[in-house]
Image (cartoon, helix red, strand yellow):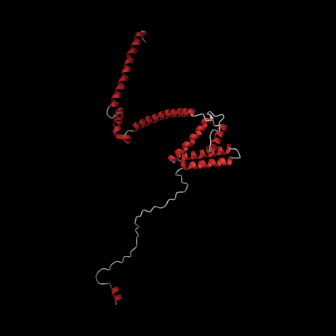
Amino acid sequence: MAPNDPTAADNDRTTVTPAKKESRLSEARTWWNEAWDEGGTLHELWEDARRAPDAGWHGMANWIKAVAAIAAFSFVVLLFTGAVDVLLDAAHRILTAAPNVQVGDNTSTGVWATIDRPIRSYIAAHSTGLPISASTVYTLWQFTGLFSLIAGFITRSNGIRLTWLAWGCAGIAMVWTTTPNTSRTVATAIAVLAWTFASAFALRGLNLRPRVFSTVHTGAPQITVQPQIHIPAQPDGPAPDNVRQLGR
């Protein structure tokens, strides 16, 4: 029969629970001690970390390489994210602080006005509805041309040179489209000449001739093998009978 006294049942539970807790703590303590013994898991990890500075990148354990690579990648991503935000904010501030160029007004003078005025008029007429103003578009246009001119002269990069070519062709097309019919040909010719003259700096070092690869002679002496005819020597002693008969 089950005991009717609830106090006895509660006492049994209180005596069993501490025993289980003590058993778990004992098992955890045993595992901890074994892991730090020689050959244990934690001991091997500690030895790998201790030998890593002297072993170098190629000699250190693979798990240390993985942890270092993940940490470095996370740090680079964090820096890149912050740098992108800073650059975008700086670009927004620069473009916002750019002078408000009245692209629709013909403010340029001289020979440059022949090229600049059609480009301003084209940008002013085709920038309606953009999230940025026509003044900002014109500033970006000028910055792209100046950057591709200087960077193409310094770096000789094909990508920057393609940017310069695209920028020049687009500018010539805008001059041709916007200039009145009576002076369109002359204005376009002036734009082509100006862009060609500037291309001498932006495309510095560009060579369109195909490369000819010639055979390189090392100058090593050539050895000629000539076949030789070897006649076996006759042994000393009396000649054979057939030789004697021929001698007679």
Residue 53 can be seen, yes or no: yes
Which quarter of the rendering shows the N terminus? Answer: top left
Residue 57: percent from left, percent from top:
38, 40
Query: Residue 56 at x, y = what percent?
Result: 36, 40
Can residue 1 be seen here? The reply is no
Which one is in front, 199 or 58?
199
Which one is nearer the viewer's eye here, 111 or 3? 111
**Residue lying at 37% horizontally and 15% vertically, measured from the top left:** 15
- Considering every residue shown, the one lying at the far bottom of the view is 248
User: Residue at (37%, 18%) from the top-left corner?
Assistant: 18
Residue shown at 55% from the left, 42% from the top: 146
Classify 176 as above or below 131.
below
Quarter of the figure with the C terminus: bottom left
x, y percent for residue 16? 38, 17
Residue 232 in percent (x, y) is at 34, 77
Q: Nearer the viewer, residue 56 or 21?
A: 56
Where, by quadrant of the figure, is residue 8 drawn?
A: top left
In the displayed orientation, state which residue is furthest to the front: 110
Kindly identify the residue that appears in the image at 53 percent across and 46 percent down: 152
* Residue at the right extreme, as displayed: 182
